[in-house]
Image: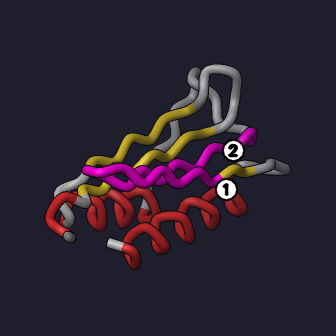
């Protein structure tokens, strides 16, 4: 799970540098009793009016997350920018 979380952050930041234009990104990790949430938000060029076409980066993130039984949510932010949020289960790791 730790490696998947690292790779998700890595890919999301690569997507920001490739597609967001001049942008700032924030990475937030929230570790709970049942899951690890990894969220990457940027303030780049994405817009709800023009959703991105999923490419290799988003597809790879989704494959990593679903292989662990998690969920991936990706979407343009309401006021510009993009969010990628991965929820990875931790309950079987104890």
Where 90 falls versus 28 (above or below)? below
Residue tagged by mark 1? 16
Which labelled disc corresponds to residue 77?
A: none
The residue nearer to you, when weighing 40 against 37, is 37
Dots 2, 1 in contact, CB < 8 A = yes
**Could you tell me how far apart the alpha carbons at marks 2 and 1 are, in whole angstroms?**
7 Å
x then y, percent, for residue 51? 51, 33
- How many discs mark residues in the rendered view? 2
Question: Is residue 29 one of those drawn in magenta?
Answer: yes
The residue nearer to you, when weighing 52 against 42, is 42
Residue tagged by mark 2? 42
In this picture, which residue range is highlighted in magenta?
27-44
* Picture quarter with the C terminus: bottom left
41 to the left or right of 93: right
Q: Residue at x 68, y 61 (%)?
A: 18
Q: Residue furthest bottom?
A: 3
Q: Secondary structure at mark 1?
A: helix
Q: Earlier in the sequence, mark 2 or mark 1?
A: 1
The residue nearer to you, when weighing 4 against 2, is 2
Q: Secondary structure at mark 2?
A: strand
Q: Residue at x 49, y 46 (%)?
A: 84
Task: Identify the main secondary structure in magenta.
Answer: strand
Q: Residue at x 47, y 54 (%)?
A: 38
């Amino acid at each position: 799970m730790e490696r998947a979380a690292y790779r998700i952050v890595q890919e999301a930041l690569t997507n920001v540098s490739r597609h967001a234009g001049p942008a700032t990104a924030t990475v937030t990790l929230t570790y709970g009793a049942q899951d690890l949430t990894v969220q990457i938000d940027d303030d780049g060029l994405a817009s709800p009016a023009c959703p991105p076409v999923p490419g290799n980066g988003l597809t790879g993130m989704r494959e990593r997350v679903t292989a662990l039984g998690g969920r991936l949510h990706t979407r343009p932010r309401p006021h510009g920018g993009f969010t990628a949020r991965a929820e990875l289960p931790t309950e079987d790791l104890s």
